[in-house]
Image (spheres, coloured by chain):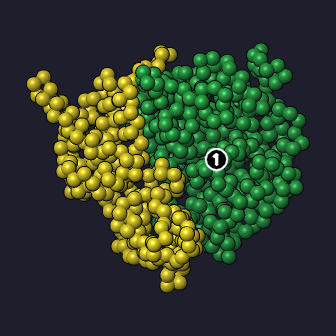
Chain colours: A green, B yellow
Amino acid sequence: MNHPILIVGSGLSGMMAAIRLCEQGFPVTLISQNSPLSSNSALASGGLNVLVAPEKHFTDTLKVGGFLANQELVKQMCFRAPEIVNYLERLGVSFNRTAEGFLERCQLPGMDDARAVMSGHTIGLQIVQALRQQLRRFENTEKLKQIQSCEFISLIKNSPGEASGVLVMDKKTLEIESIFSQVVLMATGGYAGLYENSKNHPSVDGSAISTLYQQGAALANPDLIQFSSEGYASLGGLWIDENHQTSIPNLFAAGDCEYQYHGSYRQPGNGLLAALYAGMRAASSMIKSLASRLNASLDLQIENERNQEAAINQEWFDRSGPENCYSLASELSENLALYAGDNRKQSDLKKLKEFISELKNRIQHITLRDRSSFANQELFFARRLKNRIFLAEALASSALLRHQAPAFKTTKVFYRAESVHVEYEDVLFKYLQPSEGGLI
Amino acid sequence: MSVRTIILKIKRQKNPELSAVWEEFKVIAEGEISLLALLQKIREQPINARNEAVDPIVWGGECDSRMCGDCGMLVNGQPMLACEFRLKDFDQLITLEPLTRFPVIRDLWVDRSIIEKNLKELQLWKPVDRSVLRTLASQVAPSVHAEVRELSQCIECGLCLEVCPQFNERSSFIGPQAIAMAHEHLKKDSLGLNRDQPLTRLMQKGGVADCGDAQNCVKVCPKEIPLTTSIASMKRAVVKEGFKRFFG
């Protein structure tokens, strides 16, 4: 295995992690379903917060997020923001400038001071393009291998249950291939695209998060979504610890697919920053983890798993009935917006759960319109639809329990024995108590 | 805006080996609906104008925000992004074809990986790593900044390559897009940390001298990037560099 590290997703977190790893000499495989321009990262039009006084940035971030964010991670993110901006500047990101040519900071909507560097309305595109040049640099020295023509469909686990690679499906040939590694980083983005009119990239539907959840990974706060007229942001995701390690050994997660940086509200200008910092931090954690995992055993059952996934494809072709996967997806996104929007009622959430259990049955009666075994986008969509439904169920279950939750709890959601389990987890106040509002 | 029936005539191809055939679809359009939305309608109910159930239309790109660059196609013969095209009242028949300068994968979905290949060869990266001091923000001349900002809007859609007479299977011309990106890089790399390889590639066969000055590229760019200005600037840079390398 000459590429011990595998990263899934080429938005800001995935690219940043890949760059940090390659810089330190670790060969990386980066897989994504499309070019980095097809991502929420590239669509970002706001700014990136960087404060001269990081302490203020830290306390503000915790306060607006209802003290649900991880204090250690937020602290590190805020204190390292200047370094991150400096790095991007050196890469050549064309941030807004004052008339004399110095970096300018702007006031984002909803903020009471000018704390964000911006780049017109295309900061996401600028950063994505700058990071891509670095990816090309490492591809040139063969430190990095990029695969952009396939979609993640499941995690490979070895017999002790550790992540040891992924199964992907080729977007053209529909072939299922296995890619092995010692550690896996998920950087697949959030799931706000589940909602109607979310203004997210359509691929931001949490399909990969849901796959891992169905394979045993814990989710955290999947009910938390930030609704605004500019678009929605998902705030929950895969459960991770302070080292970005998920509940599955050797599986890491960074960026919008995890939940640790924003709490219950994302401060404008913190999204891009968190994605970049999370990628950096996950890279260091993976290096540490790699040192102790060099002899991890590989699963020999892989042929079975590949056959299972191929059988799932065949099942989709074999099904017949009156349902249509695109219209079911629209129904799901409409119902999520209707029953699990900004003002949620217990009764509505229960209706949503009922709708979801009906949907689980209705997808058995989908007829795929596309019968082709080449470049069949509908087959990919159908597989994603099933994942969307399971994630929506986790979201609804978590939202139902949120109503009864004591203050300052994370909801942790598991899928076990074909049912959803939700429990509470305490948030640690390492530096700042909600009652104090000042640094400890 | 009225509700009316529109005929979409689409050039379809099941895979790279088979030849293309035309197929017509009747769709109900309301208001200034985008072409992408019409395609999505057909995808949901793929029934052609002869009332036959057929395979759904396949195309690349869904961001619907002019950002991913994947939905470039020929609309009534003109290269454009499908997400940008809004139907007008007078539109009755619209023809859609895949871009012609890139291999077709299926229907309107084309393989634009040559763009990435050309950018890789140019090596437009800065040799920068994480060992960075927290220095004060550097100063950039406002004129340079404005120029870089314009160039950095490229989404690699390939429309400029579609209309370039020099960009085709018989030539190795890297095209206006890659030249503009080289221009952007050299502008940003004011200290000249990585100039040699990009300039060498621009000077080689398929480099900037292969531009035939047709000036079609700049007219179709959805981001209005001043491609011909970049080409002129790179032509000058290459001549200058040539002299420098020859005379030492």
Task: Give percent across and percent down for residue B121.
Answer: 30, 40
Residue A58 sits in quarter: top right
Mark 1, secondary structure of its residue:
loop
Horizontal side of residue B11 vs B196, given as left or right? right
Q: Residue at x 87, y 52 (%)?
A: A346
Q: Is residue A201 left or right of residue A351?
A: left
Task: Choose between A250 and A284: the one closer to the eye.
Answer: A284
Question: Measured from the top left, where is residue B63 in percent x and y?
Answer: 53, 53
The residue at 79%/36% (across/down) is A410
Residue lying farthest bottom? B50
Q: Label 1 crowding class (10 Å Cα cut-off): few <14, some 14-19, many 20+?
A: some
Q: Quadrant of the C terminus of chain A?
A: top right
* Percent coordinates x, y for residue A282 in the rendering: 59, 31
Locate residue B168: give its quadrant: bottom left
Q: In this rendering, does residue A169 appear at all?
A: yes
B43 vs A361, left or right, is left
Q: Is residue B229 above or below residue A25?
A: below
Q: Nearer the viewer, residue A256 or A201?
A: A201
Q: Residue at x 76, y 45 (%)?
A: A223
Is the residue A245 above or below the residue A210 in the image? Answer: above
Mark 1 residue type: Gly
The residue indicated by pointer 1 is A231
Question: Can residue A248 be seen?
Answer: no
Q: Position of residue A203 (x, y in %)?
A: 58, 52
Q: Chain of mark 1?
A: A
Residue at image x 19%, y 47%? B210
In this view, the residue in front, A290 or A338, is A338
- Answer above or below: position of A350 versus A180: below
Extreme residue in the left direction: B247
Q: Nearer the viewer, residue B29 or A62?
A: B29
